[in-house]
Image (cartoon, rainbow, N blue to C red):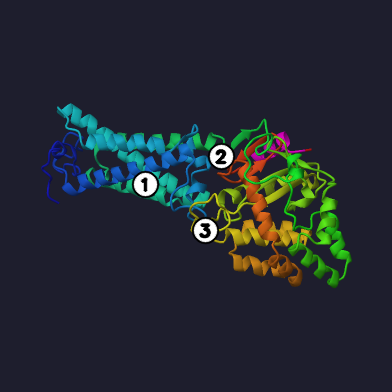
Amino acid sequence: MSSVNTPYSFYNDVFVKIGADRNNRQLPTMAESSQVSAGAWWTMLTCSLTALIVSSYLAWSSLTSSPIAGCGGASAFDCSHVLHTRWSTVFSIPVSIPAIAIHLTILSLLLARPSSAQHRRAQMATIGFASLAAGAAAVWFMYLQFFVIRHLCPYCLVAHTAGLILATAFLWEHPVSLRSLKWIGSGAVVSLATLAALQLSSDSPQTYEIIEYNKTPGLNGAPSSSANSPSEDAGLFAPPASIQLHSSVKNRIEQINSQTFLRLSIAMANPASLLVAEVQADYGKPKKTVEILGGLRLAPDAWPLVGEPDAELIFVQMFDYTCSHCRRTHASLKAAEQKYGGRLAVISLPVPLDGKCNPTVRSTAASQSEACEIAKLAIAVWATDHQQFTEFHDYLFESQPNYAQALTKAKSMLDRAKLNSVLSSSLPEDYVKRHLALYQKAGSGQIPKLLFPRKTAVGAVESMDAMIKLIDQNASR
């Protein structure tokens, strides 16, 4: 390769690509150098600049809790998952921030002009240390993504690949036989080992925010996203009028014949019918209510529920079945349920992040294009047979099916005629609208949301221990 003669020609004296001197068998020092190739200089400059831009974007996303553009929701490529693990920070600082410092250092030295041979040696040693540290960190974080986290962040992979190429370009110009390189390489390895040790010994970062309430959103003069019903004005957030509201309706369905079930289906499509009026009368005297948002109350048996309506501990969860944060929170909740058994119940309200039914969503991700349909199907399963809802709820989170697959699963679990009757009624859509009204009262924005009497946890709850702590301290009793 030809040498480069640029304003940065000090590299002609700094970068080297020589081995041992075969005549006197002495290894060269960093100062005993020949010329640098143009390709190596431009490669290092381009890689470091690329890594700097990507790392800056990832740092901004982490610090502002902003979503990563074009990345999230897929089973393998999920930046959000990667950036919310314990491996994404050290001392609660995003690892992209030290990466920014490394690449700013490399770029500044690549563009600087040293005034003496001593300065050239110091600059060369610093560039070497930073380049090898970037390469070693790239190996570590790529290993974590492929074998530990088992999710990939394309942006992270771009930055890591740039770091690997950067280190390779440096080594291409400076063979490992170089005496000074042994110290530089050892320093880079020690730095990486220190980072890994700190990450391994640190606790998982808290990935959710706690919001406290003194007054109920939408009540007591506060703005509301929808008109309140009389019962809601009294603090009770009512379900849609088209629902079989009380568990007694479920028992009634099991006891009556198919002809009466047909009448019930008609009643659900016509809220003014006598049957719905009777059901609403049942709902008017709920056995138990759950407080959220500092004063609003929900009747557990009037909403999709995992567990029993008279459970000792109950809280409300808002989620989207297609949301990766929600899937991780669901996994933590399932693990925590083993501690509580039948003592715990969760009012489970799907909030689709799909602009077709959610007016707060301006741009719908491809992975959430069927979120509205899947949410309505889950509600229909619950309305058709409360006892089957938990199994179907878990299936949607754990199997991540598309709508056609989910519908096939639902029909295999339930009476098809009853399910089709509910799906063809206004009930599923009415419920989604009420969920969204409550979601807006809770401030809209990020999900999942775990709603307790005076607090709401917003964001993914990554561990069983964190979930248990939230439930023990905040769930309604």
Given residues 393 and 10, the one toward you in this image is: 393
Residue 350 position within the rendered picture, expressed as x and y whole percent measured from the top left: 64, 53
3D distance between C-alphas at marks 2 and 3 = 22 Å
Given residues 351 and 196, the one toward you in this image is: 351
What segment is highlighted magenta in the picture? 465-476
**Callout 2 amino acid:** Thr
Q: Taking 202 as reference, is 410 left or right?
A: right
Q: Which mark is residue 207?
A: 2
Residue ID at (77%, 48%):
300
Q: Nearer the viewer, mark 3 or mark 1?
A: 3
Task: Identify the mark nearer the N-term, 3 or 1.
Answer: 1
Quadrant containing the C terminus is: top right
3D distance between C-alphas at marks 3 and 1 = 25 Å
Q: Nearer the viewer, mark 1 or mark 2?
A: 2
Residue ID at (15%, 29%):
117
Category of crowding for the residue at label 2, using alpha-carbon neighbours closer than 10 angstroms: few (below 14), some (14–19), many (at least 20): some
Q: Which mark is residue 139?
A: none
Residue 39 position (above or below residue 378): above
Residue 259 placement: quadrant: bottom right
Category of crowding for the residue at label 3, using alpha-carbon neighbours closer than 10 angstroms: few (below 14), some (14–19), many (at least 20): some
Residue located beneath label 1 in the image: 159
Residue ID at (89%, 65%):
255
Disc 1 is placed on an element classified as helix
Q: Taking 232 as reference, is 5 left or right?
A: left
Residue 294 position within the rendered picture, expressed as x and y whole percent measured from the top left: 70, 35
Residue 369 position (above or below residue 167): below
Q: Which mark is residue 367?
A: 3
